[in-house]
């Protein structure tokens, strides 16, 4: 082979892996982002005093608003672990609103 032919052949051999590298990397399956835990909330059974306890988990730390079908409502501070507890509230169906998300509390059979 003469010198120009060898350089063209060598150049093609060196360039081929570089050209195919982006395609090979694009073909590697990407792992999905970690799922955010779903927020949950529950109402305890009715206590002797006729009240219930609310508790929840999986929320973002910070303020949230709790409101119920019996008219009770207010702001609750979600702890760093994503949980909260509200003691001695009227038995009702409760919902927690944090940001644009609404979480229905389970456990009320009123």
Image (tube, rainbow, N blue to C red):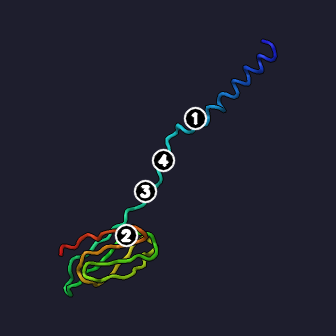
Residue 49 located left or right of residue 30: left
Label 2 residue SS: strand
- Residue 99, quarter of the rendered image: bottom left
Label 1 residue SS: helix
Residue at label 1? Answer: 23
- Residue 91, quarter of the rendered image: bottom left
Residue 14 located left or right of residue 81: right
Mark closer to the observer (1, 3): 1
Residue 59 located left or right of residue 44: right
Q: Nearer the viewer, residue 64 or 58?
A: 64
Q: Nearer the viewer, residue 80 or 107?
A: 107
Image point (25%, 83%), residue name: 90
Task: Look at the picture and state if 38 lies above or below 93.
Answer: above
Which x, y percent locates residue 37? Answer: 40, 61
Residue at label 4? Answer: 31
Label 3 residue SS: loop
Residue at label 3? Answer: 35
Task: Look at the picture and state if 46 lies above or below 106.
Answer: below
How far apart in space, not on screen, are marks 2 and 3 (Cα)?
15 Å
Residue at label 2? Answer: 57
**Residue placed farthest to the top in the image?**
1
Instruction: Say which label, 1 or 2, has the lower sequence index.
Output: 1
* Contact? badges 3 and 4 (CB < 8 Å): no
Task: Look at the picture and state if 49 lies above or below 42.
Answer: below
């Amino acid at each position: 082979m003469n010198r120009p032919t060898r350089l063209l052949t060598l150049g093609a051999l060196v360039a081929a892996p570089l050209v195919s590298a982006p395609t090979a990397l694009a073909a590697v399956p990407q792992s999905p982002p970690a799922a955010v835990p779903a927020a949950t909330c529950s109402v305890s059974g009715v206590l002797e005093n006729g009240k219930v306890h609310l508790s929840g988990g999986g929320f973002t730390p910070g303020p949230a608003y709790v409101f119920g079908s019996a008219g009770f409502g207010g702001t609750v501070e979600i702890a760093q672990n994503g949980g909260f507890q509200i003691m001695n509230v009227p038995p009702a169906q409760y919902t927690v609103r944090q940001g644009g998300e609404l979480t229905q509390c389970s456990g009320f059979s009123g």
